[in-house]
Image (cartoon, rainbow, N blue to C red):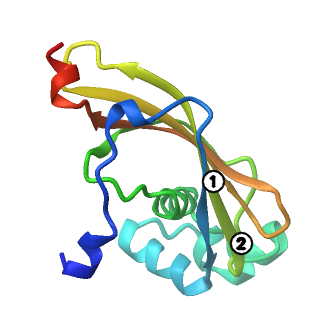
Amino acid sequence: MSASSSQRFADRWFDEYAVGQAEPGGSAVVGADDIADFARISHDDHPAHTDPGFAEPRFGGLLAHGVLTFSVVVGLTMEPNRRAVAYGYDRIRFPGPVLAGDTITATSEVVEVAAHPRNPAIGLVTKAYTGTNQDGRTVVVCRHVLAVDVRPQEAHA
């Protein structure tokens, strides 16, 4: 990791999270090259993703993989916190399609903060992620559970 990359990361402890905290993510364009690269890397070469002749009449263009859309939203909402790591994802849904050329915008909101049931050194922070396209249509939603360090004095109090 380069020095400039690590400098943008901070330390945010479990007690600094509260239900209702909302954060904008970023935006990204999902291009036809991204879809082709993802098809190659994931070995998912369904014609909806790789064959314009198949995809155009059915979807209006090449369809991005749901997991690609999910990955973009996860990246756009990545919190630069050295004290938090992914614990898991729940309730992933793709209520709308993403086509080549669409712009995805991501947001996150803390929806639950809870002690870990067995490990007092970490807490669990659940964030609701939403990805929308350039028309404001929701294209992916999920819950991301983060394991976040508890301040040492609080973990042993």
On the image, the x and y values in percent for residue 125 come to 42, 32
Which callout, 1 or 2, points at the residue further toward the start of the chain?
A: 2
Which amino acid does the dot numbered 1 rest on?
Thr
Q: Is residue 122 left or right of residue 38?
A: left
**In the rendered image, the vertical position of residue 135 relative to residue 11, given as above or below:** below
Residue assigned mark 1: 107
Please name the residue shown 64% across and 80% down the image.
51
**In the rendered image, the vertical position of residue 152 relative to residue 4, given as above or below:** above
Q: Is residue 35 left or right of residue 78?
A: right
Residue 145 image-quadrant placement: top left
Q: Is residue 66 left or right of residue 57?
A: left
Front disc: 1 or 2: 1
Count of labels in the image: 2
Please name the residue shown 67% across and 67% down the image.
104
Residue assigned mark 2: 99
Q: What secondary structure is found at the residue carrying circle 1?
A: strand
**In the rendered image, the vertical position of residue 141 relative to residue 116, given as above or below:** below
Which amino acid does the dot numbered 2 rest on?
Leu
Pointer 2 local density, CA inside 10 Å: few below 14, some 14–19, many at least 20 = many
On the image, the x and y values in percent for residue 7 come to 27, 72
On the image, the x and y values in percent for residue 75 come to 46, 63
